[in-house]
Amino acid sequence: MEAVGRARSKSRESMSIAISARRGIPAGILKWLPRSADDDQRTDPDPAKQEGCPIDSRKRRLGVIVCVGLVVGTFGCVGSAWKKALREDSRAAYHRFLRAHPDSKYTQQAEERLAYHRILQSPSLAAYQKFQRDFPGSSLLTGLRPAVEEQAFFVARARGTAEGYQAFLAEFGDGELAERARGNAAYLAANGFSGQVNALVRFAQTHPNSDYAVEARRSAETAARRNQTRIPVVALTVEVARGTPDADRLMRTFTERAAKRYRAAG
């Protein structure tokens, strides 16, 4: 009787460990774990099934405990590894994490951060645009823009159109080259202001960082000097010797040509 009592005590103790281990396991995992004889005893009112503790049921309980330990250990290991990668925050750290845990719930974040560090190490406008496609709306884009802004600006400058600069500003409107791009876009959209002195002066004052600011100031100064040195009235006297055939026609033709040259000279 004493031996039976000890056996039952051990059975109850093992059952308590198994039940405690099963608590806290996600339902999706728990349903795949084997049920122990003790689980059946808790739901089966037949006292005959509660006698003794078969060896197979002990093995099953041990299997439950081992599975629980593996599940908890695995989740804890992945979480710790991810926190370590975040603390290091480097290309090598995320590469190691993905190699060790390729299918974890942190995989996409690790891939995103790995791509981010690759672009920072080797800035490329093409890589930046691919990052946008692969990770739309990523918060890491803010940190990448300064690395590729200059490349994007020179692409817009090579296009040489107001539309090209507007496309640049749509992506880099808060960047260091934004004001320069706005000035260039304004100058090109106005077609150089067609030599209007006041408009050129205003442009140069409003957009001093524009690539066209110097040209605008020079054009304004040239136009101003021309206006100051222009002769408002020119007197022309044409004399034709007496006896010249068709004298009136000659005087009229000469006068018209002289007036035309004067207007062309500004």
Image (spheres, rainbow, N blue to C red):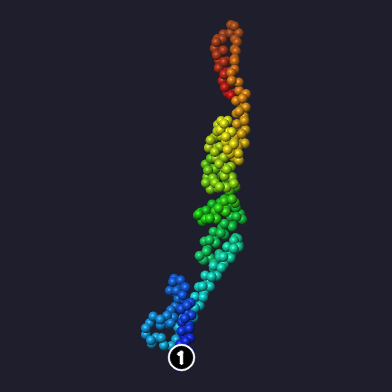
Q: In percent of the image, x 60 and y 60: which residue is there?
A: 90
Q: In percent of the image, x 45 and y 76: which residue is there?
A: 33
Q: Position of residue 16 (x, y in %)?
A: 47, 81
Q: How many marks?
A: 1
Residue that sits furthest to the top in the current view: 243
Q: Position of residue 22 (x, y in %)?
A: 46, 76
Q: Secondary structure at mark 1?
A: helix
**Residue 44 or 117: which is nearer the viewer?**
44
Asked if residue 72 is positioned above or below residue 244 in the image, the reply reads below
Q: Is 35 displayed left or right of 193 in the figure?
A: left
Q: In percent of the image, x 48 and y 86: which residue is there?
A: 10
Asked if residue 245 is positioned above or below residue 35 in the image, the reply reads above
Q: Amino acid at mark 1?
A: Val
Asked if residue 211 is positioned above or below residue 120 in the image, the reply reads above
Q: Is residue 130 visible?
A: no
**Residue 210 or 114: which is nearer the viewer?**
210
Q: In percent of the image, x 55 and y 17: which residue is there?
A: 256
Q: Position of residue 28 (x, y in %)?
A: 44, 71
Residue that sits furthest to the left in the current view: 46
Image quarter hosting the C terminus: top right
Q: Which image quadrant for residue 208?
A: top right
> Tag 1: Cα neighbours inside 10 Å, few (<14), some, or many (≥20)?
few
Q: Is residue 266 visible?
A: yes
Q: Position of residue 184 (x, y in %)?
A: 57, 40
Q: Which image quadrant for residue 231?
A: top right
The residue that disc 1 covers is: 4
